Image: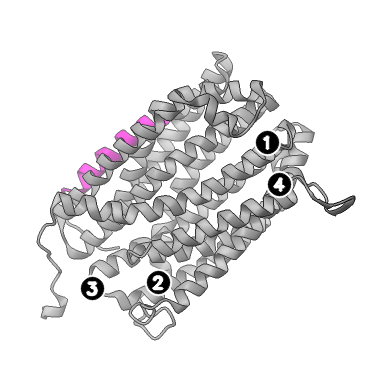
Amino acid sequence: MSQAQQPLVAAPLTLGHHIWQTLKLAGPVVVARSGVLIMMAVDTAMTGSAGGDELAYFGLGLSPTIALTLLGLGFLLGVTVLTSQADGAGEPARAGHIWHVGMGHAVVVGILFAGICQFGITILGAFGQAPDLAEGAGRVMHMLGWGLPAVLIFVACSFFLEGVSRPVAGMIIMLGANVLNLGLNWVFIQGTTVGDTVIVAAMGAEGAALATTIARWVTAFVAIGYIWFMSSRDVYCVRGGGPVVPDVGKRIRAIGYPMGLGMFIETAAFMAMTQMAGYLGKAEVAGYQIAHNLVALVFMSAIGIGAATGVRVGNAVGRNDVTGVRLAGLTGIGLVVMAMIMLGGCFILIPEFLTGLYTPDRAVAATAIAALAVASSMMIFDGSQGVLVNALRGLGDVWFPMAGQFVAFWLVATPLAWYLAFDMGLGTAGLMGGIYAGCVMATLIAAFRFRHMLRRPLRRS
């Protein structure tokens, strides 16, 4: 075997180095991922000012599109895994081809999902929602669907940048998108008038969806432009000319299918909770949407730390560094537990302030506060399972985490949530209690698997 073919074996990196590198990667990723949820939070809060009915429409219409978005996001996670492993192995020129193929997948999947959303009213009606809820929420789902191709294009770009440890650009683009979305919400939700002349009619929840869709397309084009013109474009061969990665599309799909299904399984369970809240009434579904949005915002910190952990694990795999894999995983767990304790504590310390940002309706706020009380300590387990699953993805282990999420969120969380919410009469707090149990189970399964994988030889995807 020639020297060029010898597996790379690096000297183990220190724990302090892993902490610093994880935080350096996680910070921009947290902001970028949080930006996606902040956009939804702003949409939710500004839609709430148009009335409880509009908030209920937006919550129900948003829920299925989130599930589709995360399904597509999972399909594209192979871009990060393959790029980070190539970069860690000293083969940056392969990254450009990986990005090109990932972009093609993003366009195809995005168009498919946009088509599904055009049947939003029919889909929500099939879920058993009342006709007025299905009609209003279906229009929101229809409008948000047009932005799904843009979301996945941006995701492919940001995953490429994260894989080569350059996540700051994605963060800046997302911050700009939030500013644009805020301004467009003012225009479309309440309408715009000049004197007695109506320039834009008030669109309520549908206006918030339109604003988000426009902002998403802007982020997609800006992200493509940044990568195309970035100073290191020739190093990564983003304009072509680099080595062709054998079977890269097949490898992205092999990694992405189970990842996407795993994320969809978890998100679909959360979507099922939102639909269950709809059976409780408009105030309950609006309150649950607020609680779920706050939980998702806090979880973005876990997503950022998890994404950074996955990249660090992928780099260590590329170096054939077993100790590095172990330290990268343990560092991510330690950081996410500390973050979830601090952020989840806000659900107990200042719940009235947090819910007041969304709605002045006391009945809606009360249902949200009940759910947040349960969610406060749940975040520790939710964050931990998120980081562990990302660490397993960095190792290229994808099918077992998917099976674990199915067990945790469909065999445990969903039936328990129904029992607690309806049979026990706990309402939104019961729905969140079911999710709590699912997160604990998911953490135990993923921790067991990560420990097992450390005993096996490292293998690039």
Along the polypeptide, which appears first: circle 4 or circle 2?
2
* Percent coordinates x, y for residue 266 in the rendering: 47, 40
Point out the stretch of residues depicted in magenta.
438-455
Name the residue at 33% across, 76% down: 94
Q: Magenta stretch: residue 444 in it?
A: yes
Using the numbered discs, state the Cα–Cα distance from disc 3 to disc 1 in whole angstroms: 50 Å
**Residues at circles 4 and 2 in contact by the CB criterion of under 8 Å:** no
Given residues 250 and 210, the one toward you in this image is 210
Rendered view: 133 above or below 113: above
Using the numbered discs, state the Cα–Cα distance from disc 4 to disc 1 in whole angstroms: 14 Å
- Count residues near mark 3 (Cα–Cα under 10 Å), then give few for <14, some for 14-19, many for 20+: some
Using the numbered discs, state the Cα–Cα distance from disc 3 to disc 2 in whole angstroms: 15 Å
Rendered view: 130 above or below 321: above
Q: Which residue is mark 3?
A: 90
Along the polypeptide, which appears first: circle 3 or circle 2?
3
Q: Which residue is mark 1?
A: 48
Mark 3 or mark 1: which is in front? Answer: 1
Q: Can you say which quadrant of the picture contains the N terminus?
A: bottom left
Q: Which residue is mark 4?
A: 140
